[in-house]
C-alpha cells in the first residue's frame, strides 16, 4: 500500500527553487531576467555635452571600500561589499544580494582629461565625471621635396 504525504502541491516547487538557488549561487551569470546577482554593480554611462557621466548603484558599500583609477582608456572600479549579517548558509531561504570583492573595467568611449576627473558618492550612488578632452582638428603635414 502506497503512503501519501498530504500537504501543499507547491512544496515540491519551493524545494526545487531552493535547490536551484543553491546550485546557481556561485555561478557567474549576468543574463537579464535571472535572479542571480552580478558579481559587480550595474553601471550607466551617459554622454553629455562636455563630459561623460558614469553612475553606479552601490548599496551597502562604504566610501572607504571603493577605488577608482583611469588608465589606457579604461576606468577601473574596485570595491568590496561586506556581508551585514553573517549567518550560516543553512539559515538562508533566499540569497540574492552579492557580497565580497569585485572589480569592473569599463572602456571609455573617447579621450578624457585625466587632470579634471571627479567622483561623488551620495546615498549609495556613485557618480564619476569624466570631462572630455578637447577635440583635435586634423592638421596638414607639409611635405618638402628632397634631393636625391
Image: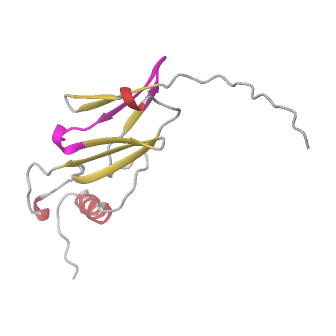
* Residue 130 horizontal side relative to residue 124, left or right: right
Q: Position of residue 35 (x, y in %)?
A: 33, 49
Quick check: 4 above or below 148? Answer: below
Give the quadrant of residue 146: top right
Taking the spot 24% from the left edge, 62% from the top edge, the residue there is: 15
Q: Position of residue 148 (x, y in %)?
A: 91, 44
Quick check: 12 above or below 116? Answer: below
- Pick whichever, 40 or 22, lies toward us: 40
- Pick whichever, 74 or 116, lies toward us: 116
Residue 53 part of the magenta-drawn span: yes
Can see residue 40? yes
| Quadrant location of the N terminus in the rendered image | bottom left
The range drawn in magenta is 45-66
Q: Position of residue 113 (x, y in %)?
A: 44, 28
Q: Position of residue 32 (x, y in %)?
A: 43, 45
Judged from this view, the residue extending furthest toward the right is: 148
- Pick whichever, 67 or 6, lies toward us: 67
Amino acid at each position: 500500500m502506497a503512503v501519501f504525504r498530504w500537504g501543499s502541491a507547491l512544496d515540491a516547487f519551493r524545494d526545487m527553487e531552493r535547490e536551484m538557488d543553491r546550485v546557481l549561487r556561485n555561478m557567474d551569470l549576468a543574463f537579464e531576467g535571472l535572479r542571480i546577482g552580478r558579481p559587480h554593480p550595474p553601471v550607466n554611462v551617459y554622454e553629455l555635452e562636455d563630459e561623460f557621466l558614469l553612475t553606479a548603484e552601490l548599496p551597502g558599500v562604504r566610501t572607504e571600500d571603493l577605488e577608482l583609477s583611469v588608465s589606457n582608456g579604461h576606468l577601473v572600479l574596485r570595491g568590496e561589499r561586506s556581508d551585514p549579517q553573517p549567518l550560516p548558509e543553512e539559515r538562508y531561504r533566499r540569497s540574492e544580494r552579492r557580497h565580497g570583492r569585485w572589480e569592473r573595467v569599463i572602456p571609455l568611449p573617447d579621450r578624457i582629461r585625466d587632470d579634471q576627473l571627479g567622483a561623488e558618492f551620495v546615498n549609495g550612488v556613485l557618480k564619476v565625471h569624466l570631462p572630455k578632452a578637447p577635440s583635435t582638428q586634423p592638421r596638414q603635414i607639409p611635405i618638402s621635396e628632397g634631393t636625391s
